[in-house]
Amino acid sequence: MKKVMVKLDNVKKDYEGKKIIKGISLDIYEGEFLTLLGPSGCGKTTLLRTISGLEKVSSGKIYIDGEDVTDVIPRKREVNTIFQNFALFSHMTVEKNIGFGLKMKKVPKSEIKTRVKEVIELIQMEGFEDRKPTQLSGGQQQRVALARGIVNKPKVLLLDEPLSSLDMKLRKQMQVELKRIQKKMGITFIYVTHDQDEALSMSDRVAIINNGVIEQIDTPRKLYDAPKTKFVADFIGESNQFNAVVVSTQNDEATIKLEIDLEIKVKNNHYDVGEKLTVIIRPEQFRLAREKDITNCFVVKTKEHIYSGSFTKVLGKVGKKEIEFIIYNDDDYTKNEEVKLKFSSDDIVILEENNEE
Amino acid sequence: MKNKSKFLYLSPVVIYAIVLILFPILYILFLSFQTNDNYGGIIYSLTLNNYIKIFDIVYLRVLFKSASIAFITTVICILISYPFCIFISEKKPNVQKILITLVMVPFLTNSLIRTYGWIVLLRKEGVFNSILQALNICDGPISFMYNNMGVFIGLVYTLLPFMILPVYSSVSKIDKKVLEASEDLGANAYHTFTKVILPQTLPGIFNGSLMVFIPAIGMFFIADLLGGGKIMLVGNLIKNQFLVSRNWPFGAAISIFLIVITFLLVKLYKKTGGNMDDLGGF
């Protein structure tokens, strides 16, 4: 049984009459790397700020390491935040910046010195101790901001889109770095981002937030393979979503009809005849069909080919429905007006429509 | 081609600076090494006498008095404008713009005229004294002017915008996130102010101080009008040398002396770790 480090109990936050967070409950375990992922304005940053205390909750409780901190002011909470624009103290040197938190906690000077030296080694910034933040590159500033947080050995480190101002290459590099440092320090990380690649590549678990509620919280793999809502399927990776209706049910098999006029057989999950479903098929789950294939097959009119190196993304239409699929370069495929595609009923995800809203 | 057009764009500024700033200063510098005759004329010679004369006890006293008045004026301006700027910076951006524009409105009227306005308010039968006596707050009239107080009121009033603008520019530049970071890292309100806000606004305060202190030394008309001629600022001294004593070389020497002091103050600021970019930053 893993220890719960942060517990959110039905946290709500209203701001100027608008409901930003509409009741979120969440357990975050010790040493976990949890990401809050969602589109901008979904409430993920606000949620993070309620944990740091920079934002007060409207109702609900927040526990850190078992202690109710709902009404505790930020500086008394054993959490630290890494801000989006780094928020470094521009008038202090790197060393002073990193040591600021310890100094405020009245840690003896000699101890501050050794601990600051340790984290400077950890972030590989030896020799930069006396520089001012303006004399550092974006990536270096990011490291200093990170060091300024972890040097205090907080129980939880909150990261608010810390990589968003870095360029692509640096971001990838820092992702690896962050993960390495998190593992080494064993600190619980709560990470906010709107970038799904970042979320999927670093996190132990990802909470998908939309409109102030958690849509789904799961491991990155499960989020992709088994999304529980249309929103999650759409937000994580690419997906084709089909409306479908149950035509008939046998014991453990059901026949459903997709909106592209295709009947397929799927596992019966207590479906009723006439029940509405949503079927989700990822672009890479389509395969080119051969002449002899007859089940789970349909013909697509292709419209656009987008070449992406190892594969080509193809946009097509079945009737009025837009379909996206992927052709690998070694596939026996020539650009064609019409293509026959197939898929396996085992791969697809079926959502019961009434789960929605 | 490109360099040529660049020069063309810059030429009005360059010509302005050379003709109206550089030449007069060079002329003043030249004058300061000359001697005057008894009728206000200039005898061309090369002498340091004018500079030596500044260190005469009579003039040193004026310098000292003038510097202390300017210093106190500067401190009062800091004390008024700092809270004011923090107050403004917490308003919405549009409100901030309006308030800062209001600070600059007095510039639309000549400062001499505005100083006359203060006389109407401050004199013995003036607006303030009438109100105070009508409300029975005091018996006799209070001497608001023709003394040190009049000079301070005049100087602070005239120079306050020059403090507010640079201080506001540095206060408003502080990122709210940085203050949150400070709080997040365990600093209380006092430490956030002394360790984060104050150091970051120091360039603005210094910039404002220069822009208040230097003119405050020289604002002779305020000392004349509100000080009743009893208070002698360095500005009065220079004015008197040029217009009354007709000793242009000595007046020029004092002027150059003031310019040198200004340079030294900026140097001092640089030495103490100040950033020159911050000084021009408003």
Image (spheres, coloured by chain):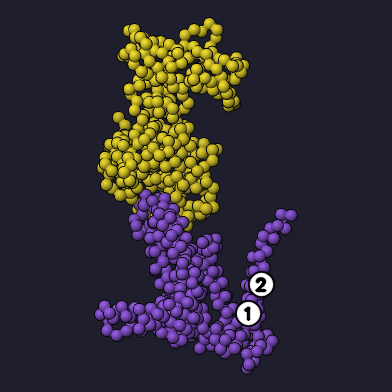
Chain colours: A yellow, B purple
Q: Which residue is mark 2?
A: B19
Kind of residue at badge 2: Val
Q: Quadrant of residue A193?
A: top left
* Viewer can see residue A229: yes
Residue depth check, mark 2 versus mark 1: number of the one nearer the observer: 2
Numbered badge on residue B28: 1
Query: What residue appears at the point 65 percent right and 85 percent down from the top-left corner?
Result: B34
Of the pair B75 and B105, the residue shown nearer to us: B105
Question: Residue A224, how many percent across, how many down?
Answer: 43, 25
Q: Is residue A191 left or right of residue A300?
A: left
Question: Residue A125, how many percent across, how many down?
Answer: 51, 47
Where disc 2 sits, the SS reads helix
Query: What residue appears at the point 39 percent right and 45 percent down from the top-left corner?
Result: A81
Where disc 1 sits, the SS reads helix
Image quarter where the N terminus of chain B lies is bottom right
Question: Residue A215, how many percent across, how many down?
Answer: 36, 30
In the displayed structure, A40 sits above or below B125; it is above
Q: Is residue B259 left or right of residue A154?
A: right
Query: What residue appears at the point 62 percent right and 85 percent down from the top-left corner?
Result: B249
Question: Residue A102, how many percent across, how many down?
Answer: 38, 52
